[in-house]
Image (cartoon, rainbow, N blue to C red):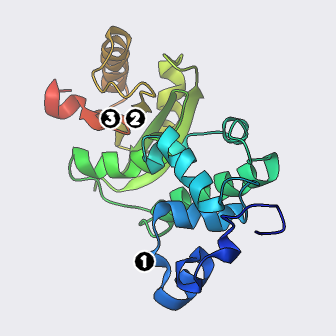
Amino acid sequence: MDKNGSINGIKSWAEEDRPREKMIKSGVRNLTNAELIAILLGSGTRSVSAVDLAKEILSGCNNNLNSLGRMKPGDLTEYRGIGIAKAVVISAALELGRRRKTADMDSNPKISCSSDAAALMAPILADLDVEEFWVLCLNRANRVVKKEKISSGGISGVFVDPRLVLLPAIKSKSSNIILGHNHPSGNLQPSAQDISLTKKISEACKFLDIHLLDHIIVSQAGYYSFADSRGI
C-alpha cells in the first residue's frame, strides 16, 4: 500500500514496470502513450494508478493523441485525479510536441504542390477547435516569404475581409499567395461560403497582378486543395 492508501501504487510495482525506471533503462521510445502521460501526471488517486488514469484519459479521446492535444486544461480536470496543475503540465507537453513539428521547417520553404502547402499549414491549424484563416505569401520562385493569420472565428465559420487577405501580399511584394483555413468538424469539403470567398479573392488578385495558387482546407482528417479538386 502506498502513502495514498492505494495497493496499486506504482512504487509497489516491479522496477522494470515503472514508467520512469522503464524509460531510464529501455529508452523513452519503449514506453506506451499511457506510460508517457503517467510520467507527466506523477501520481494517480487512492484507487487508480497514474498509468490507469492515463489510460482513462486516452480512452476518452479514442486513444488519439491529436484529439488529446485539442483538449483544454479545463477539459482535463473533469477526470478524477486531474487538478489544474496536472492538466497544465499535460497541455504544455502536447504543445511542445506540436511546436516540434515546425521547429526544423525551412523558414522560406518552396511550395511545389498542394501537399507542400498542407504540410506547412497543418501544424498551425489542424488541432484548433475554432476556425482560423491564414495566407501564405510567395515570391516568383514560389518560396514562402510571409505567413500571416488574417482572422479567427468560431467552430463553424470565420469572417474574412478579402482586402485584409491581400494586404500582407502587397506589403511583402509577393507574386503569389495560397489561402488556408481549418475545419474543426473534420469535414474537408468546402462550404458554399468557402467557394464564394475563394472566387472573390481570386478576382481581386487579378487586378493586383497577384496569382492565387491554391486554397487549402485542413483538419485532423487530412486536407482539401481547391487547385487539385476545383481549379483556381
Residue 225 is drawn in which quadrant? top left
162 or 218: nearer the viewer: 218
| Residue mark closest to the camera, 2 vs 1 | 1
Tag 3–tag 2 contact (CB < 8 Å): yes
Circle 3 or circle 1, nearest the eye: 1
Amino acid under disc 3:
Ile
User: SS at mark 1?
Assistant: helix
Three-letter code, disc 2? Gly
How many discs appear?
A: 3
- Observer-nearest of 227 and 18: 18
Residue bearing mark 3? 216
Tell me where residue 47 appears, x and y as whole percent: 70, 53
Q: Element at badge 3?
A: strand
Considering depth in this image, is 89 or 124 the residue closer to the camera?
89
- Amino acid type at circle 1 is Asn
Name the outermost residue toward the bottom. Answer: 25
Write down the residue under mark 2.
180
Where is residue 195, by image quadrant? top left
Mark 2 or 1, nearer chain start: 1
Q: Earlier in the sequence, mark 3 or mark 2?
A: 2
Question: Residue, x 42% and y 46% (percent of image)?
Answer: 64
Q: Secondary structure at mark 2?
A: strand
Relative to the observer, which residue lies in front, 134 or 190? 190
Residue 33 picture location, percent across and down: 48, 61
Crowding at mark 3 (Cα within 10 Å: few <14, some 14-19, many 20+): many
Judging by the rendered image, the residue that carries numbered circle 1 is 30
